[in-house]
Amino acid sequence: QVQLVESGGGLVEPGQSLTLSCVASGSTLADVYAIGWFRQAPGKEREGIGCISSGGVQTSYTYSVQGRFTISRDDAKNTVFLQMNGLKPEETALYYCAADNWGPVKDLCDMREGVYDYWGQGTQVTVSS
């Protein structure tokens, strides 16, 4: 079992950047757990915004963040990052990371929330001038 804690959220102005961290404990992420990032805005459903495979080779992003958001992992720190550039007001939301054990599959990931078994509590990102 793995526990996840997100951090790095805050208030930024439109166009600015922010990096979120997802620190895992209880299990090693490397080569075992794929990580997904999700967000939920007030009054909206939670949406997948990107993921990274357990081997760190494959990443996928939803269309609206492609070219602006980057997911990376530091396996030595058991941490996954979400670098967000060019933030927009409509991206104000609670951001979550989630983990799923993909076993021997190390080069794929999935942005569907139903795939993931372990979730953090989320970190708030507010984009406003």
Image (tube, grey):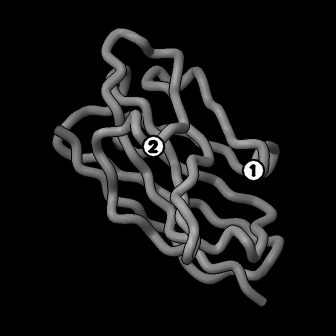
The three-letter amino acid code for the residue at tag 2 is Glu
In this rendering, the answer to whether 108 lies above or below 60 is: above
70 sits left or right of 1 in the view: right
Q: Which mark is residue 65?
A: 1
How crowded pointer 1 is (Cα within 10 Å; few <14, some 14-19, many 20+) is rated as some
Quarter of the image with the N terminus is top left
Q: How many marks?
A: 2
Identify the residue shown where x is 43% and y is 25%.
Answer: 54
Residue extending farthest to the bottom is 129
The three-letter amino acid code for the residue at tag 1 is Val
Identify the residue shown where x is 57% and y is 53%.
Answer: 47
Picture quarter containing residue 90?
bottom right
Q: Residue 78 placed where, x, y %?
A: 34, 41
Viewer-side residue, 95 vs 30: 95
Q: Residue 39 placed where, x, y %?
A: 54, 60
Quarter of the image with the C terminus is bottom right
Write down the residue under mark 2: 113
Q: Residue 122 placed where, x, y %?
A: 41, 65
Q: Which mark is residue 119?
A: none
Tag 2, which secondary structure? helix
Residue extending farthest to the top is 104
How crowded pointer 2 is (Cα within 10 Å; few <14, some 14-19, many 20+) is rated as some
Tag 1, which secondary structure? helix
Q: Earlier in the sequence, mark 1 or mark 2?
A: 1
In this rendering, the answer to whether 46 lies above or below 127 is: above
Picture quarter containing residue 32?
top left
Viewer-side residue, 30 vs 95: 95
